[in-house]
Amino acid sequence: MASPLHQFEIVELAPIHIGGVNLSYTNSALWMTIAIIVVTTFLVVAMTNRQLVPGRLQSMAEVLYEFIGQMVKDNVGSAGRPYFPFIFSLFVFFLLGNLLGLIPYSFTFTSHLAVTLGMAVFIFLATTVIGFAKHGLHYFSLFLPGGAPIFLAPLLVPIEILSYFMRPLSLALRLFANMTAGHTLMKVFAGFVAMMGVFGVVPLVFVVALFGLETLVAFLQAFVYTILTCIYLNDALHLH
Amino acid sequence: MPQFDPSVWPTQLFWLAVLFIILVVLMAKVALPPIAEILEEREARIDDQLRKAENLKRDAEDAAEAYEKTLSAARADAQAVLQAVRDEAHAEASRRGAELSQKLHAELATAEARIAEARDGAIAELKDVATDLVGSITERLAGERYDRAKIAATVDAVMREAA
């Protein structure tokens, strides 16, 4: 039987090597592509024949749009409007990554630290650049919470700086760890089903329950990743 | 774990960047604008309808107010007309009453005068008859004819005594 970690293996589908760097099109890239196609197709199909009084599909697309729109509005305010397409893409990308990963024999690209950390570092750098571009050196005031007594500054500033630099790591690890742990656990219990024969119904019930939980986690973690991005963006735009 | 194998990082990062940029462009240029458009359109329409409803409501209120005003004016007019008619009728009635009572008074007075005259006439006639009667009786009884003027004076005295 394959190891529970086998599902995380990166498989090269179309080898591309540029300057000694392996940039092959892999199963990870394939499922990213599928996610993009699914999202775009869904939204475009839902919006053909769009009506003032929406049908089912159009309602779903609108609910998704307004869900993220409200999130950006609540957490960033009207200044977050230009970043809405990015935030929306971020949410649907990771949501679809998590959900498509639940299909048996598929690949979960959000279970790879490279993806979650790559995105987190980009968000970290982008929000930092936005913060300095908007506030100049005043952006450093982020490291001293407002209203804190000045004699606590030697203690607070290092903590705040540390927590600031931990942002991309916590953002990346949270999603990566949730996806990896959930999928590994499912695979382990699925293995038990095969091994235990007739008594396999017991782990099977567990796998079914776990699948429900993982579906919830797929939504929740995409939501958490997105809302934290909104909060970081808000810090960059409005300081504290 | 394959996740910690550094050899698979560059390809993932590369395709993440490429594909995510494609996704953002697709969302920003293709997928999201129609949704934003329809939501704005709906909001505008709802606002418009609400505004219209507000205007209609205000119109209805104005009309109701005007109606109320007209109604109360009409009621006041009617009241005034009614009062005027009532006053007029009252005045007419009292005038007629006064006229009637005056007329009745006058008629009463003439009737009383006529009665008094009739009575005086009757008394005078009675006196004549009594004088003739007394003359006839005394002539038959005494066989003697008395002077008529003397008898009349006596009758007169008796009648006055009796009265």
Image (cartoon, coloured by chain):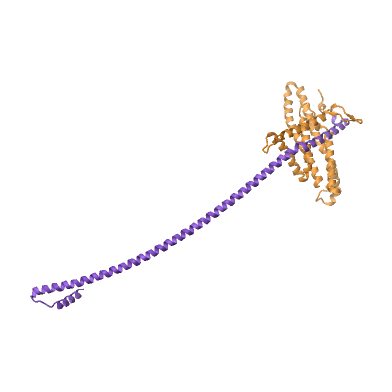
Picture coordinates of residue B75, whole percent (x, y): 50, 56
Out of B62 and A29, give the one closest to the viewer.
Answer: B62
Q: Residue B38 appears in which quarter of the rendering? A: top right
Q: Colour of chain A?
A: orange
Picture coordinates of residue A2, whole percent (x, y): 81, 24
Out of B89 and A92, give the one closest to the viewer.
Answer: B89
Q: Which residue shows up at 84% across the image and 41% down it? A: A126
Residue A108 appears in the picture as rendered: no
Residue B121 appears in the picture as rendered: yes
Direction from residue B114 to residue B58 in the image, left or right: right
Picture coordinates of residue A140, whole percent (x, y): 85, 47
Image quarter (top left, top right, bottom left or bottom right) of the N terminus of chain B: top right
Image quarter (top left, top right, bottom left or bottom right) of the C terminus of chain B: bottom left
Out of A212 and A87, give the one closest to the viewer.
Answer: A87
Direction from residue B110 to residue A146 in the image, left or right: right
Q: Residue B26 appears in which quarter of the rendering? A: top right
Question: Tag count in the figure?
Answer: 0
Picture coordinates of residue A30, whole percent (x, y): 81, 29
Q: Residue A91 appears in which quarter of the rendering? A: top right
In the image, residue B72 sits, relative to residue A91, either above or below, namely below
In the image, residue A117 sits, relative to residue B66, either above or below, namely above
Q: Which chain is in purple here?
A: B
